[in-house]
Amino acid sequence: MARRCGLLLASTLVCDAFLQELLLANDECDQHSETCAQNALQRRALAHSQSEKRPKCQDVSQGSSCHEEAQWAQSSGIHEHPEWYPHLTVDSSLLDFQCRVYQSNPAKCPKPCSTQCEDPPPSHSPPVTPQQCVGHEDAKACLCIFDIDRTLTSKQGTQDTCGGSKAFPGIADSAYGGGELVLSQLAAKGLDGTFCSKCYVGICSHGDGTGEFSKERTELLKILNTEAMQKLVLKPQNAAWSDMKLLSPYVVFQPDAKKQEAVAQIIEWYASQEVCIQRENTYFFDDKDVNINPFRGTGINAHQVSCNSRDAILNWGEVGLCGATQEEIKIEKGVSVCQVDCQWTAWGAWNACSATCGGGQRLAWRSLGGQVPSASNSSSCTRAMDSDFLPLLP
């Protein structure tokens, strides 16, 4: 959630991590009001100016968030998920791993300069109707697809601070360091209180739900047992969870920023079961904005959840904390992410003059902070993300 912010036109505050994905002027609200169009056009103007300043490539530097991502991929990721790093080995260079991170999610790492690295393919999957469903789409059928970690689950150990969540002692949850499973308020209450109770369902997750035949997966299937799911010819509980195409509606091991492609495959899986669901009636829910923005232009609805609870320990609120709530599961068209409230702090004290004589200047600083909601304090500013200074000439 926390991203570097800047001033835009008439003092409009926008976070530049969203700029690459917020270029469609009419993809922000149901009705194309003047305000929606104006905001999108402002973002487009800023995106253009920012892109002119950004280097075309940059090698990973010590201490950067990209360095942490590439280093984790080199030391741990290649062992835990070798399928994420095709053609790489433990002996591959850090720049090669930077390239792979860039290809998987350009928001995490820039393209490296000192090694050959191809650009990732366009993120938007084309809005293609499965062949067997052409002319046979069911206008009444709907599909709800959920991420697992921090969407259907809460952070382990937060059952006392995350209202409505439910702990399952003795059931392991391997996500983000591991612990005992805690279901989010949405999962604990179930889908009956949401429009998804009448829909087909699926899972599209970066994590694997603690692996094959896990007790966590068993609990998740109980949540997703809607009336529509009971009508399937092949019962989903008898289908394998997989990251491979057309095996089930439960897709795991999906890289961030690529989930829109897997969701399209889930629609195809339903088509193979003679269930023809329109993209405009498909809804995806995830706690990370990097997995939501790429759905723009696909015709599939996608909404970020866990907006009022963010895990400040993980990349300054990039990841949800308590997971989804029933109130966040709305039948809304389009693509939406959590709002980041950025505001300037008070001016700090003047520093020493830059010269003892002959002219100089003194500076005072203020910071632009991002409001990242947490479970205990919804307005705590967790990190200074930009700065401004006021010179005082002698």
Image: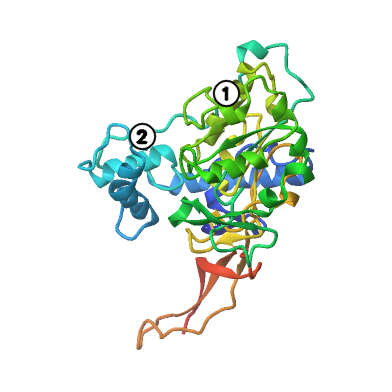
Report the amino acid beneath label 1.
Answer: Pro
Farthest residue to the bottom: give it.
356
Q: Distance between the residues labelled 2 and 1?
A: 25 Å
**Which residue corresponds to the image point at 27% horizontal and 44% vertical from the top-left?**
95
Residue 316 vs residue 358, the one in the foreground: 316
How many numbered circles are shown?
2
The residue carrying mark 1 is 126
Q: Where is residue 253 in the image (x, y as percent from the top left)?
A: 46, 38
Mark 2 secondary-structure assignment: helix
Colour scheme of the picture: rainbow
185 relative to 212 in the view: left or right: right
Q: Position of residue 49 (x, y in %)?
A: 52, 47
**Which residue corresponds to the image point at 79% horizontal and 41% vertical from the top-left?**
33
Farthest residue to the front: give it.
170
Of the 4 image quadrants, the one containing the N terminus is bottom right
In contact (CB < 8 Å): disc 2 and disc 1: no
**Which residue corresponds to the image point at 43% horizontal and 56% vertical from the top-left?**
177
Which circle marks residue 83 in the picture? 2
Report the amino acid beneath label 2.
Answer: Glu
Instruction: Answer yes or no: is residue 298 visible.
Output: yes
**Up-down: is 92 above or below 346?**
above
